[in-house]
Image: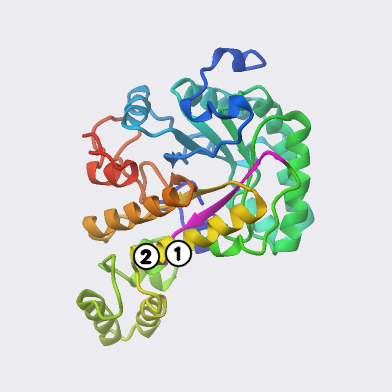
Amino acid sequence: MASSRTSVPISRRQALALAGGSVAAALSIPKLAAAQATNRRTVPSRGFNLPGWVDRSDGIAPSEVVLEKLHGLGFETVRLPVNGDLIAKGDAKALRLIREGVADLVRHGFAVIVDMHPSESLHAALRLDFDAGAERVSQAWTALRSVIADLPAASVYPELLNEPPLESQAWLGLRDHLAEIVRSRCPHHTLVWGPSPSQGIWEIGQTPPLADDNQIAAIHFYAPTAFTHQCETWDASPLARVSNLPFPATKETADVQERIKALRTAGDEQAAALIEEQLSTPWTEAAISAEFAGLKRWSEAHECPVIMNEFGVLNFCVGAESRVAWVRAVRRAAEAHQVGWVHWELDHGFGFIQNRRSADGFDPLMTAALLGSDGGG
């Protein structure tokens, strides 16, 4: 994912693809990691993504009161995107910002997934000049692994590369190389990785796990995109012209038929056909659950835990009840199939609060859908 889907002009793939050695002793270990302390692998869950902080030179940190409120509501995990271009050369200031940011989150009781999230430039390099791109990612992890090594293994999870824009064979070779780089300094941290090129749930089936006893496979879930990405603004996709679709829905749903008719009347066959194509499978909670049943089968076959570390619905033009229904359905499906979950994102277009600096403006319907509670206030 890019650090902000709502303000940066990036492509669809990029949008989806877009302190020292004493720290460990000083930080508290979240409840989520208790099992790991007794040599059991655990999967972080009940989380949210927090882009726009340590992945930018002008990033904005969440306030103390917001972190306290989020943890008090029941959120346990933060996925923290990191920009490899800022640290590939070993920039001490950028590395210090990451260390301090992660340490602060752990101090508040969160598990933290440190996500190597390629910039637009690095994303392009990986696609157009694999050797150069792979070297940049390797340099970034060579610098970052020392920071990770200083942070508690029970609370901090290095994620090798978000949505690797590569064919599977190329990615698996690079994945194994990055794992070796991180593992050489971080023998006890749980490594996180996902399939290429978009980390989709459908891409995990033919992807083998790492040859490592301490790993988690990570997938993203945004199906159907005609629903989750209505009115997107970052490229020329027909999704930008799709609006006001409900969930659940079938081709026969009145609101769906109305939208398809309006698009065809306006001469937009591309957007109308997209909706019809994606409704070849009805948009229901049962259909979502079936996807996670397949993910669980892969997990059991490979004895590899799994996490969904991105899912969400853009809030630009979707009905609040439909958005909440989809989020609740996905969260329930993940939990029912022993899949950890981390929502994309906190406070931008897919978010559930208005401002990371203010404890006001939390969306109680969304927090209830995510946490299965009254959602706070």
366 or 100: nearer the eye?
366
Which quadrant of the view contains residue 148? top right
Judged left or right of residue 258, residue 124 is: right
Location of residue 252 (image quadrant): bottom left
Residue sitting at x 42%, y 39%: 46
Give the extent of the magenta segment.
213-224
Q: Residues within 10 Å of mark 1 (few under 14, many from 20)?
A: few
Quick one: 365 or 315, which is closer to the camera? 365
Q: How is the image coloured?
A: rainbow
| Image quadrant where residue 273 sits | bottom left
Does the magenta portion include 215?
A: yes
Residue 221 position, x and y percent, is 47, 57
Horizontal side of residue 335 vs 298, given as left or right: left
Does residue 79 lie above or below 129 as drawn?
above
The residue at the point 30 percent across, 55 percent down is 315
Residue 75 visible somewhere in the drawing: yes
Label 2 neighbour load within 10 Å: few <14, some 14-19, many 20+: few
Q: Secondary structure at mark 2?
A: helix
Q: Is residue 88 left or right of residue 239?
A: right
Residue identified by numbered label 2 = 286
Helix, strand or loop status at disc 1: helix
**Residue designated by label 1:** 290
What's the residue type where badge 2 is placed? Ala
